[in-house]
Image (tube, rainbow, N blue to C red):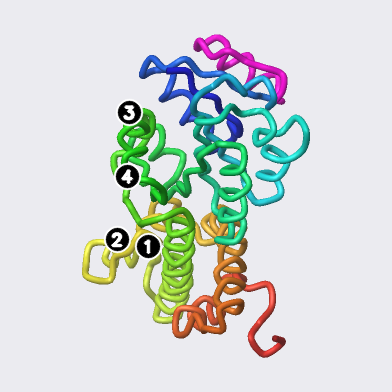
C-alpha cells in the first residue's frame, strides 16, 4: 500500500523511517532539502506539494497545531480538495475537538474518511516502535490501518467515535501537565531540604511517587532543560483543554489548579485574570 505523509518533523520523521523500513511505499511532502534528500535516499518518493499525495489511499498528517493542519487540508490544493472518495486521512496532531469534528464533517462531504488519532510519546518512542496512538473512528477501518500504525506504535487504544480520541488526549495531557508541576515542585522542595536532585529523582522514580514526568526529568537531568522541552507543548494543550471545558460550562477542577500553581508557566491566562 502507498502511504502519503505530511509533516516529517521531529515526530513525523521517525514515523516515515519506520514505514519505509517496514516496506511501505511512502509519498512524502518535504519542504526542507535535507529532509527530502534523507528520505529519498531511504526510498521515499518525495513530491513537491500536498496535491500530489491525492492518489494515496491513506494519507498521514503530523502537524504541530491547528494552523499547520489547516495549511495542509484546506484550499484548492489542500488534501480535502484533492483526495479521492474512499481515501483515509489519519490526523496525528493534538488539536481541539471542534477542529477534528469540523474536519471530519467536511471530509465526509467529499467521501474522505478522517481518523482521529492523536499520539502519546516522544520521538525516541516512535523510533523504537513503542508509540501510543489513540484511535477515534470506525472499528472496521482500524483493521485496515493496523499494519500502518503498527510500524511505529505498540498500542492503538480505541476511544470511540471521531473526537473522542482528541478529548482523551487533552485529558491525558492535562494530567501529565499536573505531574510536570509536581515533579518540578518536588525537586525544588528537595533542594530546600538539602537533598541532592539526582539522588532524590532516583528515589522518587523507584518508589511509589514515580510518574512519566519524574522519569523524564530524571532522564533529562536538568530542570531547565526539561522545561524547555516540555513547556511549549504542554502550554498549547493546556490552553486547548481549558477552552473545551469553558465551552462546555465545566471546570478542570483540581487538575487545572495543579497546572496553574506550579514552578512552570503552563497557563497563558491565570484564573484570577479570567
| Residue marked by disc 4 | 139
Q: Is residue 250 visible?
A: yes
Look at the image and say whether residue 40 sits in the magenta stretch: yes
Tag shown at residue 214: 1
| Residue marked by disc 2 | 202
Q: Is residue 31 above or below residue 235?
A: above
C-alpha span from label 2 to label 3: 38 Å
C-alpha span from label 3 to label 4: 14 Å
Q: Residue 51: x and y, percent?
A: 69, 24
Q: Reading the chain from its start, which is encountered first: label 4 or label 1?
A: 4
Q: Reading the chain from its start, which is encountered first: label 4 or label 2?
A: 4
Tell me which segment is drawn in magenta: 31-49
Residues under numbered marks 4 and 1 in contact, where contact means CB atoms less than 8 Å apart: no
Tell which of 74 and 186 is nearer to you: 74
Tell me where residue 261 sits by quadrant: bottom right
Badge 4 crowding class, 10 Å Cα cut-off, few under 14, some 14 to 19, many 20 or more, is: few
SS under mark 1: helix
Amino acid at each position: 500500500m502507498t502511504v502519503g505523509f505530511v509533516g516529517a518533523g521531529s515526530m513525523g520523521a521517525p514515523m516515515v523511517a519506520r514505514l519505509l523500513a517496514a516496506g511501505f511505499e511512502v509519498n512524502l511532502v518535504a519542504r526542507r532539502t535535507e529532509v527530502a534528500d534523507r528520505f529519498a535516499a531511504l526510498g521515499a518518493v518525495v513530491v513537491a506539494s500536498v496535491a500530489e499525495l491525492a492518489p494515496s489511499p491513506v494519507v498521514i498528517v503530523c502537524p504541530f497545531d491547528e494552523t499547520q493542519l489547516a495549511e495542509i487540508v484546506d484550499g484548492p490544493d489542500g488534501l480535502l480538495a484533492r483526495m479521492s472518495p474512499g481515501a483515509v486521512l489519519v490526523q496525528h496532531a493534538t488539536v481541539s475537538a471542534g477542529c477534528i469534528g469540523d474536519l471530519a464533517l467536511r471530509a465526509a462531504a467529499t467521501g474522505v474518511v478522517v481518523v482521529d488519532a492523536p499520539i502519546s510519546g516522544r520521538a525516541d518512542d516512535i523510533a523504537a516502535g513503542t508509540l501510543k496512538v489513540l484511535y477515534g473512528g470506525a472499528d472496521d477501518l482500524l483493521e485496515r490501518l493496523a499494519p500502518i500504525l503498527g510500524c511505529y506504535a505498540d498500542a492503538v487504544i480505541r476511544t470511540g467515535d471521531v473526537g473522542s480520541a482528541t478529548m482523551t488526549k487533552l485529558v491525558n495531557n492535562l494530567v501529565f501537565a499536573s505531574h510536570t508541576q509536581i515533579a518540578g515542585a518536588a525537586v525544588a522542595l528537595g533542594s530546600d531540604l538539602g537533598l541532592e536532585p539526582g539522588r532524590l529523582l532516583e528515589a522518587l522514580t523507584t518508589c511509589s511517587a514515580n510518574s512519566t514526568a519524574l522519569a523524564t526529568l530524571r532522564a533529562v537531568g536538568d530542570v531547565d532543560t526539561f522545561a524547555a522541552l516540555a513547556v511549549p507543548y504542554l502550554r498549547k494543550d493546556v490552553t486547548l483543554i481549558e477552552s473545551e471545558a469553558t465551552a462546555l460550562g465545566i471546570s478542570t477542577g483540581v487538575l487545572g489548579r495543579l497546572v496553574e500553581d506550579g514552578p512552570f508557566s503552563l497557563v497563558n491566562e491565570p484564573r484570577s485574570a479570567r
